[in-house]
């Protein structure tokens, strides 16, 4: 399946749009995850200069330092989402990129815990990039490409969150590691010696700057020029007369519906805004027609878009509100028959849809559980063997993270899309959650066999490979479902809410991870290093429970028919 806007003849604009989204999202992954490895070594560095070597205190401060970035995003992500709905996605993205660039440079040159904390908080406070980028993708990509496009976006984020710790691990203390043989660069008073954490931060800053430049010149603003609900509805629903279906995609008579407009002022207004919406979609290179998006509770059935056959769309009672709002409008299907009175409206506010609450809560839990393991794993791996750790250096820890990146690339590019088409959204996310149990338990198991050469390394490499597959399934499935079910005209706000919730959980997770690591010493229980990982299993179970309430129709999104 091909991204439609890559194949367009628009002088390379489609490819530029995709590339700018991908690079900026990749840079955000780097920004978020870089402290996962270097924060604990920063705290150890500042603590040792004061003669302090308290593992409990180190764990607590590491968690706090890591959480400030996401804590700031929690306070501002929803306002940034609203701003993007009012003023556009691109300004929000560019402001966030510039702030991220300055923040990470300041972080690398920090001399104290306070300076580093302020730098991280400032970087998150002015950053509404993640929600805006997901909105741009949802508005730039047609239905057929949604699952694959989101898997590519997840690949960018996954690689960023993996390579951030890798960059931190390999380039922290460069004169003791990667540049140890360069006497000219590592003189006694050189900046590489006096600022041992600056180099990895400068590398991430360079990637962020590249994303900013590419976004400025190449990214197309996707917010419709008019803000009326009628135009947004036309832009979102792609309302067109029936067209012949592409071979192998089933009859459009079974998956498409139309709005027929009698002569009235409101109908004329809708027709004009409808035409504007279609022109806007065409200007972005988004194919129009050949599909109808509908399912109950405002969700969107995509089964036919992925080559399967689909029953005639059903309409929830809420869709009648659209009919009432547009004077003289009648809803009909392609056979000219009025639909049942149970038809959906994506103009329904998101906070009135149970599906949205379930999706947003599940996304928050997924962000929480993966961030918790990302935070605790370096603390655990760097701790002395005597206290249940692995006594690994930053460069040793970078190896498993690098391997995770390789697995993520292979799986996301060559396997994931096929798997989701066969499984559907819910089953795909559930598989990711089950695999997350495996990863979560495997990490602390490595500490039980430190006396066997290379066995802890083998366990950690395997655990990271499992995590790459698990995160691809869990994150991508929920992101696709959120973009598809989001009410019309509120996609930026919905993604702002999802990013706010994710920011909150990602702020809680590092602090919680550090606190659990410290608590495990106070409890003085056997295998205390397992405590934080066992708690993470509780969060996985909570996400699975929420998914039990997903409607059966949700699993149709992104799924092939059994005959295909």
Image (spheres, rainbow, N blue to C red):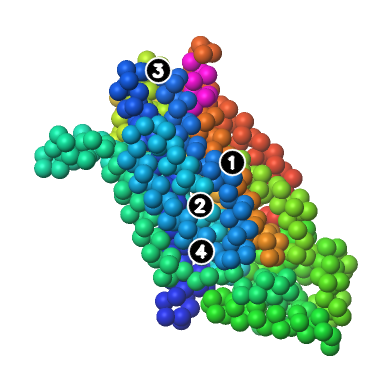
* Magenta segment: 514-521
Label 1, label 3: how far apart the Cα atoms are: 28 Å
Given residues 460 and 371, the one toward you in this image is: 371
Q: Who comes first in sequence, dot 4 or dot 3?
A: 3
Q: Nearer the viewer, mark 1 or mark 2?
A: 2
Taking the image as shown, residue 275 lies to the left or right of residue 54, namely right
SS at mark 3 in the image: loop
Disc 2 marks which residue?
A: 127
Q: Provide residue 548's location: percent of width, then percent of height.
A: 72, 43
Q: Who comes first in sequence, dot 1 or dot 2?
A: 2
Label 2, label 3: how far apart the Cα atoms are: 34 Å
Magenta-colored stretch includes residue 382 = no
Q: Residue at x 28, y 44 (%)?
A: 199
Q: Nearer the viewer, mark 1 or mark 4?
A: 4
Disc 1 marks which residue?
A: 504
Q: Provide residue 366's location: percent of width, then percent of height.
A: 58, 42
The single residue placed furthest to the top in the displayed view is 524
The single residue placed furthest to the left in the displayed view is 184
Q: Who comes first in sequence, dot 4 or dot 2?
A: 4
SS at mark 2 in the image: loop
Taking the image as shown, residue 445 lies to the left or right of residue 271, namely left
Q: Who comes first in sequence, dot 1 or dot 4?
A: 4
Disc 4 marks which residue?
A: 91
Given residues 234 and 104, the one toward you in this image is: 104
Label 4, label 2: how far apart the Cα atoms are: 11 Å
State whether residue 391 is above or below residue 107: above
Disc 3 marks which residue?
A: 54
Q: Who comes first in sequence, dot 2 or dot 3?
A: 3
Specify the quadrant that holds the C terminus. Answer: bottom right
């Amino acid at each position: 399946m091909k991204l439609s806007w890559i194949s367009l003849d628009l002088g390379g604009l489609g490819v530029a749009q995709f590339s700018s989204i991908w690079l900026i999202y990749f840079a955000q992954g780097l920004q978020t995850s870089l402290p996962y490895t270097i924060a604990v070594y920063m705290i150890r560095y500042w603590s040792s200069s004061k003669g302090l070597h308290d593992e409990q205190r180190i764990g607590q401060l590491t968690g706090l330092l890591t959480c400030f970035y996401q804590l700031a995003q929690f306070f501002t992500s929803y306002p940034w989402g609203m701003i993007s709905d009012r003023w556009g996605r691109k300004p929000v993205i560019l402001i966030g990129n510039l702030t991220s660039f300055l923040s990470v440079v300041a972080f690398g040159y920090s001399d104290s815990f306070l300076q580093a904390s302020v730098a991280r908080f400032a970087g998150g406070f002015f950053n509404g990039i993640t929600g805006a980028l997901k909105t741009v993708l949802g508005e730039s990509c047609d239905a057929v490409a949604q699952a694959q496009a989101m898997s590519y976006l997840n690949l960018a984020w996954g690689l960023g969150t993996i390579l951030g710790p890798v960059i931190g691990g390999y380039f922290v203390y460069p004169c003791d590691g990667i540049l140890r043989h360069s006497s000219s660069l590592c003189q006694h008073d050189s900046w590489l010696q006096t600022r041992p954490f600056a180099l990895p931060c400068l590398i991430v800053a360079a990637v962020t700057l590249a994303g900013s430049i590419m976004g400025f010149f190449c990214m197309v603003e996707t917010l419709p020029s008019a803000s009326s609900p009628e135009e947004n509805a036309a832009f979102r629903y792609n309302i067109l007369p029936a067209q012949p279906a592409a071979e192998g995609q089933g009859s459009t008579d079974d998956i498409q519906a139309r709005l027929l407009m009698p002569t009235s002022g409101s109908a004329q207004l809708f027709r004009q805004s409808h035409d504007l919406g279609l022109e806007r979609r065409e200007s972005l290179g988004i194919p129009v027609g050949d599909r109808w998006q509908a399912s109950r509770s405002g969700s969107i059935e995509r089964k036919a878009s992925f080559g399967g056959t689909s029953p005639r769309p059903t309409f929830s009672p809420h869709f009648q509100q659209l009919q009432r709002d547009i004077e003289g409008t009648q809803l009909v299907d392609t056979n000219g028959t009025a639909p049942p009175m149970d038809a959906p409206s994506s103009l329904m506010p998101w906070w009135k849809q149970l599906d949205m609450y379930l999706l947003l809560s599940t996304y928050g839990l997924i962000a929480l559980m993966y961030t918790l393991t990302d935070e605790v794993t370096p603390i655990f791996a760097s701790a002395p063997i005597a206290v249940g750790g692995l006594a690994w250096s930053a460069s040793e820890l970078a190896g498993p993270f690098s391997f995770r990146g390789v697995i993520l690339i292979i799986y996301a590019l060559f396997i994931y899309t096929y798997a989701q088409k066969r499984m559907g959204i819910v089953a795909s996310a559930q598989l990711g959650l089950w695999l997350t149990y495996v990863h979560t338990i495997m990490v602390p198991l490595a500490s039980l066999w430190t006396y066997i050469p290379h066995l802890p390394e083998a366990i950690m490499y395997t655990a990271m490979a499992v995590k790459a597959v698990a995160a691809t399934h869990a994150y991508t499935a929920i992101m696709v479902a959120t973009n598809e079910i989001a009410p019309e005209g509120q996609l930026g706000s919905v993604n702002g809410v999802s990013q706010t919730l994710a920011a909150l959980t990602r702020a809680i997770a590092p602090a919680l991870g550090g606190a659990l690591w410290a608590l495990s010493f106070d409890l003085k229980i056997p295998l205390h290093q397992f405590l934080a990982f066992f708690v993470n299993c509780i969060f996985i179970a909570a996400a699975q429970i929420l998914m039990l309430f997903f409607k059966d129709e949700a699993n149709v999104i992104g799924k092939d028919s059994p005959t295909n």
